[in-house]
Image (spheres, grey):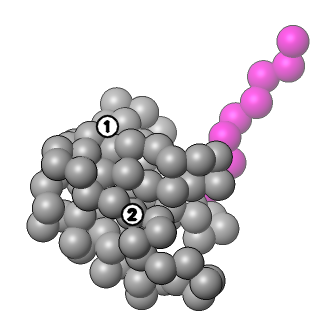
Amino acid sequence: MKRYRKKPVEIEAMQFTDLDSYLKIVEWWKAQNTGTLTADEVFTFKRPIMLVATLEGTMSANPGDWIIRGVKGEFYPCKPDIFAATYDEVE
């Protein structure tokens, strides 16, 4: 078996915690969006979770999860432990 290393890639992310952070994430998405979808088609706030429409289907984000904008501009949730193991903050 061969071993592989993940390529270093910088991403943007915001942590989802509550309605206030949800609204900030939606505004962030609107600033990045160049497609035909509306924010209501991508994000839904259903206390206490946030639903995110991704290329793989709708995913839920719990408070504390991170919302990531990937290398192709896609948005998706990530659990805090996976985020911490995968990403370091860039100064």
Tell me if mark 1 has few (under 14), some (14-19) or many (20+) residues whose alpha carbon lies within 10 angstroms of its own. Answer: some
Q: Does the rendering let one see residue 49? A: yes
At 33% from the left and 60% from the top, the residue drawn is 44
Q: Tell me how many marks there are.
A: 2
Quadrant where the image shows the N terminus: top right
Front: mark 2 or 1? 2
Above/below status of 76 relative to 60: below
At 78% from the left and 22% from the top, the residue drawn is 3
Above/below status of 5 relative to 75: above
Above/below status of 52 relative to 5: below
Quadrant where the image shows the C terminus: bottom left
Q: In the image, what residue type sits under mark 2? A: Phe
Give the percent coordinates (x, y) of residue 66: 34, 50
Looking at the rendered structure, the secondary structure element under dot 2 is strand
Magenta region: which residues? Answer: 1-10
| Mark 2 or 1, nearer chain start | 2
Identify the image quadrant of residue 81: top left
Identify residue for label 2: 43
Identify residue for label 1: 80
At 23% from the left and 64% from the top, the residue drawn is 22
